[in-house]
């Protein structure tokens, strides 16, 4: 019951608190306009691949909920949106479902209402390898997300305090699991050093889960009603920088890259893809749209987002998702300063050579 209440608190507070205080960093990225695109809208393809799995479009409705039967309605609606738009989808953590049989219905409903879609299972990165197959079989998953949420756990009153052995455990799961394994951060981002470690463990993709979107530190601070944790609310690596960090490692290494954290519209999506992502994840804004206006409104919004993404791609002269990574970019502000501090070669990282 404690876990179920926590899941419900997360949903309630994620819609109340919003993003921030950090931004995701996309305001510091600009495209170079192409006035001679030599391209028609009919030629633009949104399909992409992640972890060897073909996706109809680059949007993943990312892990956000599940684990309590009362949340079945939310996951059903998310699944219906995914089915109607052709988006891949990841469920929230199934740990309680596979270890204590809690909230199984809230996960099974996803496959029931999206029988032919791409769906990812989800467990903590410290989950014992012998329970992984149960999570995958529960929803006939096409892949497995392992989430990293160290900062959230530290603010959570009932959270873990020991995070040793994670890398070894991830390696064991990758060796044992038959589906691709994706390791996802949950709002604090990744650096190139950690991405390299994960790549060496055998992961098929990383989801950088950068700062600037749903702030789980703020959510946990609100749950415990302790303002003493407010100084940690701006902790983390903004999503735009985290994509660049990961790109340096995954490029040429057959490892997929998902960008999530504060991606809220088509322009954010296009910038994330141009920075190096193969796909982008959204969660909080889609769930909020569903709760306020219903499934059909969320479907319409995503459909419009894809139309705008095609227009942006046309304005850059690019006819496919992978091609966006070759479009010259301009950096400014905090992101430019971060790039300089990390010692990266600016012409290379901005797609200008």
Image (spheres, helix red, strand yellow):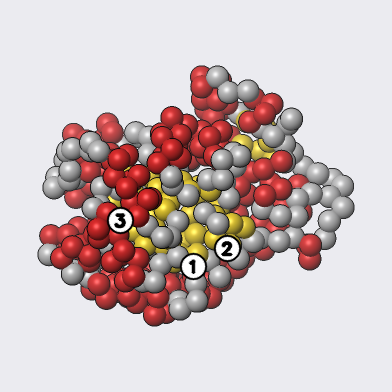
The secondary element bearing badge 1 is classed as loop
The secondary element bearing badge 2 is classed as strand
Please tell me which of labels 2 and 3 falls first in the chain. Answer: 2
Residue 39 can be seen, yes or no: yes
Tell me residue 8's x, y (percent): 23, 63
Give the numbered dot on residue 118: 1
Which picture quadrant has residue 43?
bottom right
Please tell me which of labels 1 and 2 falls first in the chain. Answer: 2
Q: Residue at x 56, y 33 (%)?
A: 248
Give the numbered dot on residue 55: 2
Q: Is residue 112 above or below residue 141?
A: below
Query: Do callouts 2 and 3 mark residues in contact (Cβ within 8 Å)?
Result: no
Q: Which residue is mark 3?
A: 123
Q: Is residue 232 above or below residue 128?
A: above
Tell me residue 30's x, y (percent): 66, 38
Q: Residue at x 28, y 51 (%)?
A: 124
Please tell me which of labels 1 and 3 falls first in the chain. Answer: 1
The answer to whether 282 appears left or right of 130 in the picture is: right
Q: Residue at x 32, y 47 (%)?
A: 172
Towards the viewer: 296 or 109 = 109
């Amino acid at each position: 019951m404690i876990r179920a209440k926590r899941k419900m608190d997360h949903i309630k507070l994620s819609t109340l608190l919003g993003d921030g205080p950090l931004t995701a960093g996309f305001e510091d990225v600009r495209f170079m306009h192409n006035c001679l695109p030599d391209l028609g809208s009919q030629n633009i393809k949104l399909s992409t691949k992640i972890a060897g799995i073909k996706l109809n479009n680059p949007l993943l409705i990312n892990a956000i909920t599940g684990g309590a039967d009362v949340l079945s309605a939310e996951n059903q609606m998310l699944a219906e949106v995914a089915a109607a738009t052709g988006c891949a989808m990841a469920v929230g953590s199934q740990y309680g479902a596979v270890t204590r049989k809690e909230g199984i219905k809230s996960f099974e409903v996803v496959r029931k209402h999206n029988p032919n879609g791409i769906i990812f299972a989800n467990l903590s990165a410290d989950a014992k390898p012998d329970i992984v197959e149960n999570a995958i079989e529960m929803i006939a998953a096409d892949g497995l997300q392992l989430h990293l949420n160290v900062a959230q756990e530290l603010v959570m009153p009932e959270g873990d305090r020991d995070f040793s052995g994670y890398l070894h455990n991830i390696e064991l799961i990758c060796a044992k699991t038959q589906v691709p394994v994706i390791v996802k951060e949950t709002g604090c981002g990744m650096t190139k050093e950690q991405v390299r470690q994960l790549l060496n463990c055998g992961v098929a993709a990383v989801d950088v889960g950068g700062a600037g979107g749903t702030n789980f530190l703020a959510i946990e601070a609100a749950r415990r009603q302790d303002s003493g944790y407010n100084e940690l609310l701006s902790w983390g690596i903004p999503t735009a920088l985290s994509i660049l960090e990961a790109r340096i490692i995954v490029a040429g290494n057959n490892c997929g890259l998902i960008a999530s954290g504060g991606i809220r519209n088509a322009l954010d999506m296009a910038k994330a893809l141009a920075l190096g992502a193969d796909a982008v994840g959204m969660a909080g804004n889609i769930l909020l749209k569903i709760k306020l206006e219903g499934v059909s409104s969320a479907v319409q919004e995503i459909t419009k987002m894809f139309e705008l993404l095609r227009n942006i791609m046309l304005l850059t002269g690019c006819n496919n998702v992978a091609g966006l990574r070759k479009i010259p970019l301009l950096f400014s502000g905090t992101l430019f300063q971060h790039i300089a501090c990390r010692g990266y070669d600016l012409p290379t990282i901005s797609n200008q050579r």
